[in-house]
Image: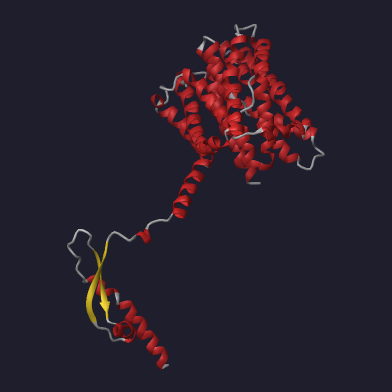
Amino acid sequence: MIRSAHFHHRQSQVKRLPIYFQSLPRTSSRNSGFCLPVLSAKSRFSSLVGSSRYVGRSCAPEKFPDAWEPGPNQIIEQKEDILTILSRSNSFLPHIIVSSTLLALVYPPSFTWFTSRYYAPALGFLMFAVGVNSSEKDFFEAFKRPTVIFTGYLGQFVVKPLLGYLFGTISVAILRLPMPIGVGIILTSCVSGAQLSNYATFLTDPSMAPLSVVMTSLSTATAVFVTPLLSLLLIGKRLPVDVKGMISSILQIVIAPIASGLILNRYFHPISNAIRPYLPPLSVFVTSLCIGAPLAININAVLSPFGLTILLLVVAFHLSGFVAGYMLSGLAFHNSPDVKALQRTLSYETGMQSSLLALALANRFFQDPLVGVPPAISVVVMSLMGFSLVMLWTKK
């Protein structure tokens, strides 16, 4: 009991020690700091048992010595943390899509400066970012599952254009919308797969991400020939289409940037590693501009009396694409052990396409601005629906 009493008494004395610090003055020198009490050698021990003797004070400068400064390892860790945060900027993409949409609707001038002449360079930058983050291994994956690749290709350039033609015809023949609206819906269905489908697949089924990259890359590469052909077959009789100009445009917007990124990643690895962490935040920023600007520029058409009708048509078109891709892959690969993952992957591939490419083509090759309204709405609808499926499927 006596020993316990001494222990509690020593604790109470230690707790009282900060009282000394409260009443001590600060020095007036330029490098002044905190003044600490100095105890004698005897008092340093006796203070713990209740008997202390204050003999002076010692002042430490405010500027801590070099031992308090972060070392090289701490600086490297801080730099790595910043680069990690930058590389994960894509996780904010759903929030950016919603924010850009609301901002474009509430205050259109925030995006109207980003005119149509910037669409092609912006899309080219996104394609370049895809190329930098890809390698030849991604393309080798295509040869491991050719049946899946072919099924995804059919969904991209057969099922989806047929759906686009269906809804385009409904918009004109049944809903009595202007002809350019139907053309815009059809044009949206004729372009290649969206790179956002690769990111959505990665969030839902990471093991399927390489397969998604291969399918999107294949559709993008062959879009140079397929998109002009589909445009000529489906809308060539209604509006003139410059097939040669479209081929040249796709080469400049898609093929050249992706090839540049692949070459940089293959032969200039240090440079690609240095710029890779900064590409995600820049891509998110560019994507926000590409989503907000079309809505802001076409705000009058979107909010027009038939704007809601166009929105519902575009939603129905994308929804049917997601469902068709899911059902088609389920029938084709019902015996596969990863059938559910394949269904989700092919659903993204069929339901999401490069609406920005369709918008760039509409602004460049069609004089009527109404042709660009369905692709402008599709940019937002496709992204919101795709990431809604991500949130739904990742919870299961």
In this image, 223 relative to 338: left or right?
left
Residue 162 visible somewhere in the drawing: yes
Left or right: residue 119 compared with residue 194: left
Pick the residue in front: 209 or 396. 209
Image x and y of residue 264, in percent = 58, 31
Task: Give whichever of 310, 379 is nearer the camera.
Answer: 379
Query: Residue at position x 62%, y 9% from top?
Result: 244
Q: Position of residue 109 (x, y in %)?
A: 39, 24
Above or below residue 22? Residue 177 is: above
Q: In what quadrant of the picture does the N terminus appear?
A: bottom left
- At which x and y percent is residue 181? 57, 15
Which residue is outermost to the left? Answer: 28
Question: Which residue sits at x=63%, y=46%?
Answer: 395
Q: Is residue 347 visible?
A: no
At 44% across and 23% down in the image, what residue appears?
296
x and y, in percent, of residue 257 in the image? 57, 24
Q: Nearer the viewer, residue 148 or 217?
A: 217
Q: Which of the 4 quarters of the picture holds residue 385?
A: top right
